[in-house]
Amino acid sequence: MSLKDRFSRIIDYMRISITDRCNLRCIYCMPHELEPLIHKEILTYEEIIRIVKVGARLGVRKVRITGGEPLARKNVQYLIRKLKEIDGIEDLSMTTNGVLLNRYAREVKESGLDRVNVSLDSLRKERYREITRGGSLEEILSGIELAEKIGLDPVKINAVIIRGINDDEIEDFARLTLTTPYHVRFIEFMPGTDNYWSEDRCVPMKEIKERIYKTFGELIPVKVRKHGPARYFRISGASGVIGFISAVTHHFCSECNRLRITPDGKIRPCLFSDTEIDLRSAIRRGADDDEIERLLRLSVAVKPEGHRISEDIPAGVINRPMSKLGG
Ligand code: SAM
Ligand code: SF4
Ligand code: SF4
């Protein structure tokens, strides 16, 4: 069985934000003070497991756990173990800021996590601390090394490039792939609520690519299994690869295969559309699995064709903080 939407896209990927809380406060993602959801608003692990079981029955094959900071939610190892046991789930990954990787990488790997994406927006100690409002670069880098060493493979590093903040590090990020096997992915800065976004702060992917080409020469296209929205290239002789995710300037909507589940249990068919389907209320009113299935199908049926950021700002602004959405 598979979930197909109105535009013939097969939806087989669920991104689940398991908490809105975070141990960092990145300037482009979260306001310094953000009222967190109260405990009972957050989906329980059992509710998440149930949703994924029904999803898997409908053809969901990939699950990503995100947040807020997913490693900061208590006993995430339990959730990982249970999700990994679900028939049909072939790929279980996590997006993390890496702060707790030194502490938990081994446990999450042993519980069944296949791989991690780590967000890292600066390779300079002071700047990293400023962007994240307090994070320690050494801690993240050693966490990344550990993740790679124990086989959370491939380790992907996500860098959101913001003009005037970290765009002078594009070459340094690219250089990292010369000596490490990491997949370094450049991500365009997306407009959100109160997140400093402006058109001129968003560095178009074309510009990032040209700068790398100027310094390192030809970028050789490479095929990466489960490439998602990124396009991958290798600098000649490099160990790692470079990925480009042009979320703003070049829609990858025609290949979109995902549904998002927010920490408070809403299905969000598209990042840039306000439409949400309230799964949590249905579950807590006693919905059976068929009803959950109906709501998942409904979300796929209303999934829009794509976003309109470049044509129609502010209609393209994301109306929830990313931490409450699961970027
Ligand atoms: N805390 C984890 C982390 O930082 O990896 C997971 C949640 S975070 C919301 C997920 C991803 O969203 C991160 O890679 C972050 O850089 C990205 N993100 C947040 N706000 C963004 C924005 N306005 N534009 C582009 N990416 C954004
Ligand atoms: Fe936290 Fe991730 Fe948002 Fe940074 S990007 S504030 S680490 S949720
Ligand atoms: Fe998918 Fe919507 Fe993002 Fe396009 S904007 S890739 S349709 S979630």
Image (cartoon, rainbow, N blue to C red):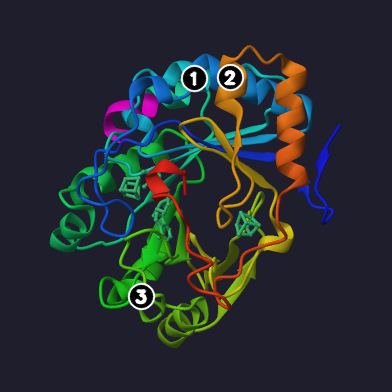
Q: Position of residue 199 (x, y in %)?
A: 41, 78
The answer to whether mark 3 and mark 1 are in CB contact below 8 A is no
Instruction: Of the two numbered discs 3 and 2 on the same chain, state the one appearing first in sequence.
Output: 2
Determine crowd level at label 1: few under 14, some 14-19, many 20+ residues with C-alpha closer than 10 A: many
Q: CA distance from mark 3 to mark 1?
A: 38 Å
Q: Going by the image, does 275 lie left or right of 115? A: right
Q: Nearer the viewer, mark 3 or mark 2?
A: 2
Q: Is mark 1 within 8 Å of ligand 1?
A: no
Residue shown at 49%/79% (left/top)? 209
Q: How many marks?
A: 3
Residue plotted at (69% across, 54% down) = 256
Q: Is mark 3 within 8 Å of ligand 1?
A: no
* Residue 59 image point, x, y percent: 78, 33
In the picture, the disc for residue 79 is 1
Image check: 119 left or right of 62?
Answer: left
SS at mark 1 in the image: helix
Q: Bounds of the magenta span? A: 101-106
Work out whether residue 204 or residue 266 is closer to the camera in this orientation and state it.
266
- Please tell me whether residue 138 is drawn above or below residue 183 in the rendered image: above
